[in-house]
Amino acid sequence: MIAVELFKLVRRVRTWFSIALMCALPLVVAIFIAVTHLAPPPGQGSAFLSAVLDNGQLYPAAALALVLPVFLPVAVAVVAGDSIAGEASAGTLRYLLARPVGRTKLLVAKLVAVVTFTLAAVIAVTVTAYATGVLILGPSRASAVGFAPGQGSGGIAPGAGGAPTAGLQAGTAITSLSGTPLTTLQLIERVLGAMAFITVSMLGVAAIAIFLSTLTDSALGAALGALATLIGSEILVTLNAASTVQPYLPTRYWLAWIDFFRQPIFWRDIQRGFAIQLVYVVVFLGAAWANFATRDITT
Amino acid sequence: MIITRNLTKRFGKIAAVRDVSLDVREGDRYGLLGPNGSGKSTLVRMLLGLVYATSGSITVLGEQVPRHASRVLPEIGALVEEPAAYPHLSGRANLRLLDAAGPHGSRRTRRRRVDDALEQVGLAGIDRRPVRAYSLGMRQRLGLAAALVRPPRLLILDEPTNGLDPRGIRDIRDLLIGLNESGVTIFLSSHLLAEVSALCTRVGVLDSGALVLQEQLASLQEPTGRVLVSTDDPERAVAALDGLVEHRDGADLVVRSSDPAALNNRLVTAGVPVRSLLAQRRSLEEIVLEVTGTGSDQFSVSAAGPHAARQAPQSAEPAEPPPAPEPPAPADRDVP
């Protein structure tokens, strides 16, 4: 059944279109920066963006920071919100279940497809951003892959937990946010770590959207519902008065992937981020299962 | 093959299906009739484990549904209301996907099974056009192909000829009769009386969620003990038959008699020129309208009795004289 869901994902134009859009945004940003040579000053703008003029190889991290707040969650919510509701409104759900495909099996296959989609999007963004960074912004100004120590004003470490405006100013080499240099291998490891963490960060949205998708026959409604939850979470994360609930909000640790670029890696928030996403998956997928397994299929 | 006991389904306060005890036997071509909204689709969905019953039990192919639905569903081909497919994929790709989704879908023989199913429903020549571009009739045929991809023991079909032209209806009927003769039990629901009477051996009638009739079609259509006589000399016929004539309309007579041959003999002996003579049988339409009330898509202001359904969408004709039964009935006698 998982193969069937993956096949459906691959054959949807929407899948490729949304991934292309996500790759296009960092490309457009890179073109503007390359043409104007105006990168945001350190500490402002999207994470890592201030450093990319000096080192194009950091652009994958900057690109991930660009798509993370809106593009990626929107795409994930649309795909996940469509999962059951889309089949229900198209009428194909009843034929799948009468095949028979177990309802639990179908939910799991849907989740796997959504995670695969997220991972594919993250990989596509990273790869195109690397190419963009190297080709448009140019490699490190210190020529090729430099391991030289960062100069002077190395990195500006954002507050623990990652403020949304984390910035990094690399010198002539790839420097961690803590100011110490990273080897190419370390950089690759950390980019991979960040990709994995971002994919996991989307699990919460995916689970919420899949749950809503079992409640309604409107794919749009489910996707918008999940997005509304995220926006609400984002608002509460920045609200001091809501500090008691903040550790449990789905977007609270979304920026913790930046901690992969510290030396040594700052694991606390990364672990919490994993944990909170796991909780969301268990709770909402459980709710989705409880609802879907006992529901009358009348569409 | 299908046995339900006191099957009831309520949606909130509305009872969509009430106390239905179906009995579909192996080899049947069973037609479930009923006006729109009488609960046919809900019943079909319950048989497939899509909708859960409020009370009562369902046994399909000897297994409890929905508890053991996963054991019996692989042996059932189903069409539930209109067919559905992924519109951006071709018909072939849709069938392959559906086949891959369920159990027993061996990858090795998939291509052949899909091609066989398409051929059976007359879609062997379809190209790679997406289903989006299909006509209603093609979609219906594709839906039937989906039900046949895994050769079923039981076909559960909801309105199988919906959207087909007369030729298509004929094709599908022939296909279903052929499948039935090779051992497939067929359970179909329809509101098309002509369809059911041309195809089915056994009928059930659903009215407002309750099963009001379940019988072999042949025994429902036993001769009624009336013979329809058409003659050029009705006066002489009335005189010769001496009170047996119940109704006269011009040259057409309704005669009380259970032996058409004897009646014919008597008329000929009396010198009556008999143009045609036919044992009267009730049409399925009369039978159904007699047992059903108003269709639930009709909302009359007056408290209509059960016979208000005579104005139902089927445009029933007046009961007398009844419309001639469909030829050829075995007891027909045509006299030149």
Image (spheres, coloured by chain):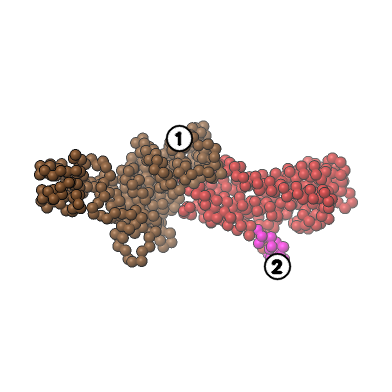
Chain colours: A red, B brown
Q: Position of residue A156 (x, y in %)?
A: 83, 54
Q: Is residue A31 magenta?
A: no
Q: Residue furthest right?
A: A152
Q: Which residue is mark 2?
A: A241
Q: Position of residue A185 (x, y in %)?
A: 78, 41
- Specify whether B68 is left or right of A116: left
The residue under the point 46% across, 53% down is A298
| Residue B261 appearing in the image | yes
Q: Say which of A24 and A150 sits in front.
A: A24
Q: Which residue is mark 1?
A: B119
- Specify whether A22 is left or right of B117: right
Quadrant position of the C terminus of chain B in the picture: top left
Q: Chain of mark 1?
A: B
| Residue B213 appearing in the image | no
Q: Secondary structure at mark 2?
A: helix
Q: Are marks 1 and 2 on the same chain?
A: no
Q: Residue furthest bottom?
A: A241
Q: Is disc 2 surrounded by few (<14), some (14 to 19) or many (20+) residues within 10 Å?
A: few
- Type of amino acid under label 1: Glu
